Image: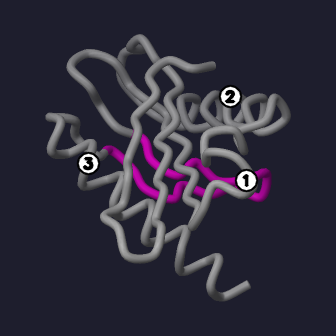
Amino acid sequence: MGNNVALGAQGEDLAAEFLTAAGMTIVDRNWRTRYGEIDLIVRSNDVLVFVEVKTRTGRRMGVPAEAVTLTKQRRIRRLAAVWLAEQSGPWTPVRFDVVSVLIESGTEPVIEHLEAVF
């Protein structure tokens, strides 16, 4: 389990760097409640983006983004509503993205940013 946690953290770091390099601003990382966690919350222009990061070391189980199931999407939406309710200030448009990080031995990580996927 420790290796999965370290792999996930590495993927989230790479995703945060990737999104920042694309001009987005990190608002929050690993925001948790007893109901779950949102990996990254970023601002892209005037849009608040809730980002699920999925990291894998191979394609045996499919590409990382395929692990964001309908159940996971529903959970992230509910968590986003809780996060938004805790914030002060005006409401802004939101979207839900997935960042897929593939870290295979002997190659550079492959990062794919899928915008507004659910």
Image coordinates for residue 77, horizontal then vertical, percent: 68, 28
Q: Secondary structure at mark 2?
A: helix
- Disc 2 marks a residue whose amino acid type is Arg
Q: Which element type, helix, strand or loop, lies under badge 3?
A: helix
Residue type of the residue flagged with mark 3: Phe
Which residue reaches farthest front?
A: 106
Q: Quadrant of residue 57?
A: bottom right
Which span is picked out in magenta?
A: 27-41
Q: Which mark is residue 77?
A: 2
- Distance from the alpha carbon under mark 1 to that under mark 2: 11 Å
| Mark 3 or 2, closer to the camera | 3
Relative placement, left or right, of 102 versus 4 is: left
According to the picture, the residue beneath numbered tag 1 turns out to be 36
User: Is residue 69 left or right of 59 when viewed as pictured?
Assistant: right
Mark 2 Cα shell of 10 Å, populated few (<14), some (14-19), many (≥20): some
Residue under the point 59% across and 61% down:
56
Label 3 crowd bin: few (<14), some (14–19), many (20+), radius 10 Å: some
Q: Earlier in the sequence, mark 1 or mark 2?
A: 1
The crowd level at tag 1 (other Cα within 10 Å; few <14, some 14-19, many 20+) is: some
Q: Is residue 60 one of those drawn in magenta?
A: no
Q: Earlier in the sequence, mark 1 or mark 3?
A: 3
Q: Nearer the viewer, residue 62 or 30?
A: 62
Measured from the top left, where is residue 8 in percent x and y?
A: 55, 68
Whether the magenta-drawn stretch holds residue 34 is answered as yes
* Residue on which the image places disc 3: 18
Near-viewer residue (55 or 44): 55
Q: How many marks?
A: 3
Q: Residue at x 46, y 28 (%)?
A: 114
